[in-house]
Image: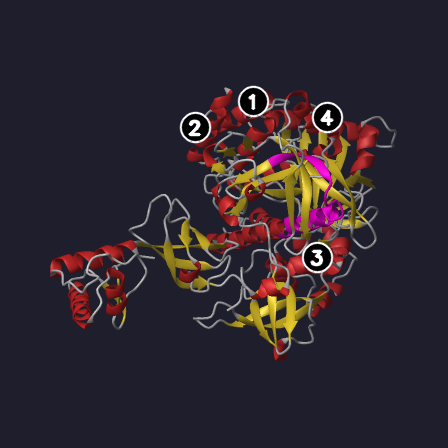
Amino acid sequence: MVKKSKKNQNNIPIGKKELKRAIGSVTKATPGISFNYKEMANVLGLPGIENHKAVFKAMEEMYADGLLEMVSTGRFRSPNKGRYITGTVDLTAKGSAYIISDDIEKDVYVSFANLKHALHGDVVKVMVYAHRSADRPEGEVVEIIERKRATMVGVLDVSGNYAFLEPTGKQLPYDIFIPVEELNGAKDGDKVVVEITSWPERHKNPIGKVTTVLGKPGDNDTEMHAIMAEFELPVEFPENVLKAAEKIPFEIPASEIAKRRDMRKVLTFTIDPADAKDFDDALSFRYLDNGTYEVGVHIADVSHYVQPNTIIDKEAYARATSVYLVDRTIPMLPEKLCNGVCSLRPNEEKLTFSAIFVMDKEANIFDSWYGRAVINSDYRFAYEEAQAIIEGADHKIKNEILTLNDLAQKMRAARFQSGALDFDREEVKFNLDEQGKPIGVFFKRSKEANKLIEEFMLLANRSVAAFVGNKPKAKTFVYRVHEKPLDDKMRELNDFIAKFGYEIKMGNPRAMTASFNTLMQSIKDKPEENLIETLAVRSMAKAIYTTENIGHFGLAFDFYTHFTSPIRRYPDVMVHRLLDRYLENGRSASKDKYEEYCKHSSEMEQLAANAERASIKYKQVEYMSDKIGQSFAGTISGVTQWGFFVELNDSKCEGLVSIAGLDDDYYEFDEPNYRIVGRHHHKTYQLGDVVTVRVAKANLFSRQLDYELAGDGNTFTGQAKEETRVAIIGGRSTRITGKKESKKRGSSKKASSKKGKKGKRK
């Protein structure tokens, strides 16, 4: 707020030029805020009718001269000399937002008052103020271009003749008013889906109606369905889609088999997780007379059964991907297709789209073939079974599996020699009881059997992409691309790791990836390993789908696509259709149309990943909810202005240690060095440090854990730190530090009482 001037308290008149200069100073200091003449006179400390008249006349003249802008009759503000951008709303817990846009380097801060009811994820047009600091650009929403969502998920608070929904997650920082006649049978305390029906301009709270009652909070099915609804992902298939799927026969006509390469008598098998039902891929193998091998990568021919523009195809495109929650899979295709007709089950004739390679014992490829085939899988292995054979267990096809494993290891070594990134990851899994409650945590580590399948899938994906794209006049295709890190991110990382004596080479992508791998080897088992590994991961771009091939930086491939999982990914279906089209010498498909498809697929992939992380986070909080007061060793996985996040070493459960709870000093956020530092005693808590924490709170409603430092709060040093060090990039819940994280997370406390919730309402 602008303070009143101490001048003219006694109604002393001032000159016109000085008055205009004072008005201009006020409006420039408050861009976006409008004043009428009375408000301006009050700010300037000019009481009385004569002064009001002088201010009114001065503002009218300034408007005529272009020095002020009229926003409505009698209301003026500083003229807009800023710029307009288009971006996406990133809502904070306090109701303000940051606008993420490609039009401006830094995110633009928008206060709640200037959001004009824009919600998280909305695409908006923003006027960026010209007179604010470049370090923190600010602006206001002038237009909501695209609403991301109209429904919210939360818990009902019913009181007499009205009700409110308290949204979960980051959907809304305030509640939704619901008239009792719009409850649709929902009761107090139910978890529900609410549709926003109106939002009066001057009201803080939107108005809505209940559309779906999910159940009672804490019930496993309720919570998993709530997560899907929160990200607006479907759970059930429409009845007409299920009926259409039921009409698709298991039997394969002889006429269809006659059109395909017959691989039914060639040794073929699948290797998948023990609980898998949808088998996307199979490998075939046979020895050739000249000492070479024929290796077939056979992929379920979903595109044969799911024809373009059918109701099944439209539903699959809308979903774009299967979603893997902690305790269930929400498939992209109806069960009859994903687990039945398309799935490459053993001892059944199945249609495939295949890539077949002739290789020597050094994994050199001499010939390749792409097209439609028919197979009959001889064996179905779980990863554990295949691994046992690799480690020495006897089996009828042991020699074939060992040969394939040897080829895979050679392809893997060649890939890393060419510059592929080598981040060793592990996946966190939960042991669940019959009610879905987590009773234990284990880590899924990739072994040779996993890598065997991985390498041949990479081979097929890379080869198919190169077959289409590596031509003088390449046709429209769907690529999976991964950009090399931005130069400024690399410089930022290099500046930091230089303190430890390390460097990453800039410029040439191959040299950069090679130096990344050298860095990862150099820091192994050193105190700075956690810190540098996390920052290296943060510097990476995200892989996306696009028709513009720029290669895959992380894999060090010039051409790459997704061909091998059409049961669970729609881009793979598109790749099969395009490949079939071009094998038949068809014309290039519409680039604009497929680019739109790629953008949708990338967005849905991100939504699915967010839902998966939310389900993991919920189970982590649920798992820790009976451990309040217990202490654990953990690694600092993120640092923000609010405190620091700690990921427990034995479970990967992440929680916040609030800076407000550190009462031994006044701590400040040192963003460039990823740490908080005590002002007086200079104690530091840095990304990668190992600390002991105590579980303080486990809030299932907000899926949030709060920790507090245990004991004296000192970080481990020396041998203790060496023994407890873990790689923090393995768990899916890893939080990376940086400005965007610090602004997304507010206080870790969320009101849960009715009194607390009503405090957010107007």
Q: Which residues are magenta?
A: 611-636
First in sequence: mark 3 or mark 1?
3
Disc 2 to disc 4, C-alpha distance: 34 Å
User: Going by the image, does 640 lie left or right of 243?
Assistant: left
Badge nearest the viewer, 3 or 1:
3
Q: Which mark is residue 224?
A: 3
Three-letter residue code for mark 3: Met
**SS for tag 4?**
helix
Disc 1 to disc 4, C-alpha distance: 25 Å
Are dots 1 and 4 in contact, CB under 8 Å?
A: no
- Within the image, what quadrant is residue 443 found in? top right
First in sequence: mark 3 or mark 2?
3
In magenta segment, residue 496: no
Residue picked out by circle 1: 518
Residue 276: x, y in percent? 77, 47
Three-letter residue code for mark 1: Thr
Residue picked out by circle 4: 406
| Residue 81 in sight here | no
Quadrant that contains the N terminus: bottom left
Image position of 197 with respect to 90: above or below: below
**SS for tag 3?**
helix
Residue picked out by circle 2: 507
Disc 3 to disc 1, C-alpha distance: 41 Å
Disc 2 to disc 1, C-alpha distance: 16 Å
User: Going by the image, does 751 lie left or right of 305?
Assistant: left
Residue 673: x, y in percent? 48, 31
First in sequence: mark 2 or mark 4?
4
User: Going by the image, does 233 lie left or right of 96?
Assistant: right
Closer to the camera in the image, 153 or 460: 153
Badge nearest the viewer, 3 or 2:
3
Badge nearest the viewer, 2 or 1:
1
- Within the image, what quadrant is residue 264 found in? top right
